[in-house]
Image (cartoon, rainbow, N blue to C red):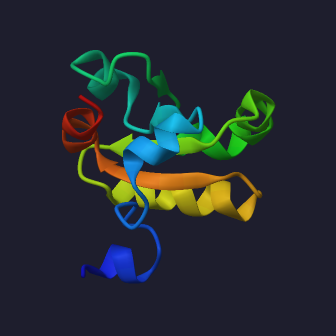
Amino acid sequence: MGLLNMLGFGGKSENVKEFMAKGAVVIDVRTYEEFASGHIKGSKNIPLQIISGKVAEIKKLNQPIIVCCRSGMRSAQAASILKAQGIEVMNGGGWEGLNRELA
């Protein structure tokens, strides 16, 4: 078990497909440029640097959230921010791995 999993931000403790079945929205927290170079179809791009300012917008979605990035580090930070605001969220880790899980 990795450090992120022990801290509760590894995301894999919950089944991604079960989370998606609850209507989860995937938010990619990479930069706009990284997102443009490839991303999960249908995901939203809200870079980590601005996610705190988008909490109200995310709450309005009224859906669970799966956050992802390149490796899982930024998404762990984003998950922590959103969880602290009462949003049901899980860290999906790296977007490429998450994309394979969702396929």
Observer-nearest of 32 and 24: 24
Judge from the rendering whether residue 99 lies leftward or rightward of residue 53; answer left or right: left
Q: Position of residue 64 (x, y in %)?
A: 63, 42
Residue 78 visible in this rendered orientation of the protein:
no
Q: Quadrant of the N terminus?
A: bottom left
Residue at 80% x, 37% y: name it: 56
Q: Position of residue 83 (x, y in %)?
A: 66, 60
The structure residue drawn at horizontal position 43% and vertical position 55%, both measured from the top left corner, is 91
Quadrant in which the C terminus is drawn: top left
Return the residue nearer the eye: 10 or 49: 10
50 and 73: which one is in front? 73
Q: Please tell me whether residue 3 is drawn above or below residue 62 in the rendered image.
A: below
Where is residue 25 drawn, in percent x and y? 54, 31
* 49 and 26: which is toward the camera: 26
**Residue 27 spot, x, y in % from top left:** 49, 34
Q: Residue at x 43, y 16 (%)?
A: 42
Q: Is residue 44 above or below residue 5?
A: above
